[in-house]
Image: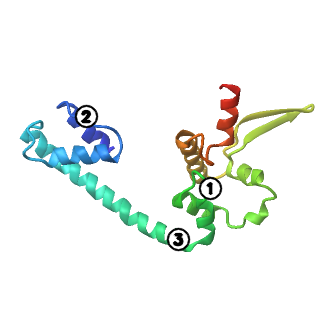
Amino acid sequence: MLVNALRGHLAEFGIVTRQGIAGVRRLIGLAEDENDELIPPLARDALVPLVEQLRAAHEKVRELDHPIQTWHRSNELSLLLETIPGIGPITAGAIVATVTDASLFKSGRQLAAWLGLVPRQNSSGGKDRLGRISKQGGPYTRRLLVVGAHAVLRFSRKESSAYPLGCRASDEEGL
């Protein structure tokens, strides 16, 4: 929200940069540079508190991230889960905290069903009908897993081992 506000205010003066952290750094640099004539002094004075809030939020995230990273590095199961494409320290920690005993599940599909990640089945007369995902489990872990899967789908390269089977199949079928 703060980044969007900074982008929006500077866009009013015709200053637009690329997305991502590099673009934000450039915008912050422009907002703080008193020698830059693209931004009027009055507007610059209004942007300084926004930049300070952005830095404070970034520092708070860094503060909160440190204990998560420390715990993650000390937990063997969390480190193992991180080897799966799309799963980072936060998602791995959420899975470890949510699934206290994985041996209770006979298969990965049962675990996925427990988390609410598999389609709901409506079977009758020998016909299997699959609906939307059941959303049976906790929404936080499910959301983290879905976001991780989307990241893998979006950013993996065809040559990579992380390139999902679903993408390979859709490429072969021309979808």
Whether residue 1 is visible here, answered yes or no, is: yes
In screen coordinates, is 122 left or right of 165? right
**Where is residue 6 shown, x and y percent of the image?**
25, 41
Give residue 125's position: percent from left, percent from top.
92, 31
User: Which quadrant of the view contains residue 87?
Assistant: bottom right
Q: Quadrant of the C terminus?
A: top right
| Contact, mark 3 vs mark 2 (Cβ under 8 Å) | no
Q: Amino acid at mark 2?
A: Val
Residue occupying image coordinates x 21% and y 36%: 10
Q: According to the image, label 2 marks what residue?
A: 16
Residue ID at (7%, 45%): 35
Q: Residue furthest top?
A: 174
Instruction: Residue 164: give x, y in percent of width and height.
Output: 65, 43
**175 or 157: nearer the eye?**
157
Is residue 124 left or right of 17 when viewed as pictured?
right
On screen, residue 52 above or below 68: above
Q: Which residue is mark 3?
A: 73
Q: Residues within 10 Å of mark 2 (few under 14, many from 20)?
A: some
Q: CA distance from mark 1 to mark 2?
A: 36 Å
Crowding around mark 1 (Cα neighbors within 10 Å: few <14, some 14 to 19, many 20+) is: few
In the rendered structure, which amino acid carries the disc numbered 1? Answer: Ile
Q: Which residue is mark 1?
A: 84
Marked residue nearer the N-terminal end (1 or 2): 2
Sequence-wise first label, 3 or 2: 2
SS category of the residue bearing label 2: loop
